[in-house]
Image (tube, grey):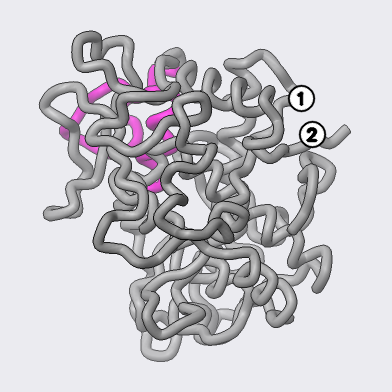
């Protein structure tokens, strides 16, 4: 029987299990994985089950496919700025969900989602950082570091805190390790920003108006297609550089900004909602995908190209990620 993914703000059990499970994965070094075994020679540090996902995402963002005129003019990488964005992250969510089930000893657990469009509808937008998700009783709020909620950093007892162990240096772009334990950083709608979270109308527009999954040149410049609009490279208004998925990353800021954005557990709540929107689109328009396997299409983003993970020996393809309703469903689709 397929498990159900619930709204984290309406299902207290999902909230409690998600937070507890994330902290268990942070402290789980049972697999004996090191940075060397992940191909990061020279660091030789143990990697928790949680941080394996952080490193995987970072590595994927730094694997660039060839920049060919007409095919990849905007630095498409192995997981973003191209067609594979949605199936790649669906695979990532499935693997994290399985790890959470393992440490929670609960095969029925479904990864929860945050319906950020509901918060995006809230006016005035200046109140959005104070909404329910960011309360101490949910996942905590802003901070440098975050000092409340289940992912807080305790300066007096860092060994018992939620700590960031691997992060992308925003200047060098390289994977770094803090010299001392450091906590999670969140900004939540920086004071200079006049933009709130994405809205329900923006989600509705994408679901209603886009009948194609993706269109040539399969990159961040595509003006049509559910993939690029949902990923967020094309704005709904001229004063915005990013919408939907990208806007959420930018709005939260801090550790949600660089390629190591899975350092913030809210990364998964965001992507689970993105996956939910994609699922709603497929229910309405069909389980279609583009590009096909033609040799002229970008490698790594074609229908049957392998999606490879650093956290399992298993691989999948976009084709296999189009219908996973035998594995999980959502309590409600937008």
Q: Is residue 53 visible?
A: yes
- Residue 136, given in percent of the width and then of the height, sits at 45, 26
Depth check: 118 or 259 in front?
118
Q: Is residue 143 magenta?
A: no
> Image height check: is 272 above or below 236?
above
User: Of the numbered discs in the image, which one, if any, rests on residue 108?
Assistant: 1
Query: Relative to 19, is 105 on the left or the right?
Result: right
Residue reaching furthest to the bottom: 70
Query: For the residue labelled by badge 1, is the local secondary structure a helix, a strand or a loop?
Result: loop
- Residue 17, given in percent of the width and then of the height, sits at 61, 21
> Image height check: is 120 above or below 327?
below
**Residue at left 82%, top 47%?**
325
**Residue at left 31%, top 57%?**
62
Q: Are marks 1 and 2 in contact (CB under 8 Å)?
A: yes
Q: Is residue 306 visible?
A: no
Quadrant where the image shows the C terminus: bottom right
Q: Is residue 53 magenta?
A: yes
**Residue at left 13%, top 54%?**
172
- Residue 217, given in percent of the width and then of the height, sits at 50, 85
Depth check: 62 or 234 in front?
234
The span picked out in magenta is 31-57
Q: Which quadrant of the figure has residue 93?
A: top right
First in sequence: mark 1 vs mark 2 = 2
Crowd class of label 2 (few under 14; some 14 to 19; many from 20; radius 10 Å): some
Q: Which quadrant of the figure has residue 221?
A: bottom left
Majority secondary structure of magenta residues: loop
User: Of the numbered discs in the image, which one, if any, rests on residue 194?
Assistant: none
- Residue 202, given in percent of the width and then of the height, sits at 60, 71
Residue reaching furthest to the right: 1
List the residue tagged with mark 2. Answer: 3
Q: Which quadrant of the figure has residue 227?
A: bottom right
């Amino acid at each position: 029987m397929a498990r159900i993914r619930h709204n984290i703000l309406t299902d207290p059990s999902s909230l409690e299990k998600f937070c507890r499970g994330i902290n268990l994965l942070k402290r789980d070094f049972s697999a004996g994985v090191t940075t060397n075994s992940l191909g990061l020679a020279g660091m030789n540090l143990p990697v928790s089950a949680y941080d394996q996902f952080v490193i995987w995402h970072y590595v994927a963002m730094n694997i660039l496919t060839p920049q060919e005129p007409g095919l990849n003019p905007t630095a498409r990488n192995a997981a973003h700025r191209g067609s594979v964005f949605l199936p790649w992250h669906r695979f990532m969510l499935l693997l994290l969900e399985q790890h959470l089930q393992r440490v929670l000893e609960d095969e029925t657990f479904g990864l929860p989602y945050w319906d950020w469009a509901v918060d995006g509808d809230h006016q005035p937008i200046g109140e959005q950082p104070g909404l329910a998700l960011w309360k101490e009783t949910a996942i905590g709020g802003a901070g440098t570091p975050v000092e409340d909620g289940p992912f807080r950093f305790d300066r007096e007892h860092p060994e018992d805190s939620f700590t960031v162990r691997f992060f992308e240096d925003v200047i060098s772009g390289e994977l770094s390790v803090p010299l001392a334990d450091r906590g999670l950083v969140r900004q939540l709608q920086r004071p200079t920003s006049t933009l709130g979270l994405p809205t329900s109308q923006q989600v509705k527009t994408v679901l209603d108006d886009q009948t194609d999954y993706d269109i040539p040149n399969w990159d961040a410049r595509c003006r049509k297609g559910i993939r690029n609009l949902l990923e967020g490279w094309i704005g709904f208004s001229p004063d915005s550089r990013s919408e939907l998925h990208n806007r959420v990353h930018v709005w939260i800021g801090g550790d949600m900004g660089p390629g190591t954005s899975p350092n913030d557990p809210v990364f998964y709540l965001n992507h689970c909602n993105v996956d939910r929107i994609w699922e709603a689109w497929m229910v309405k328009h069909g389980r279609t995908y583009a590009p096909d396997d033609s040799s002229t299409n970008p490698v790594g983003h074609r229908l049957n190209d392998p999606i490879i993970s650093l956290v399992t020996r298993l691989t999948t393809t976009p084709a296999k990620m189009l219908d996973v309703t035998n594995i999980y469903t959502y309590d409600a689709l937008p």
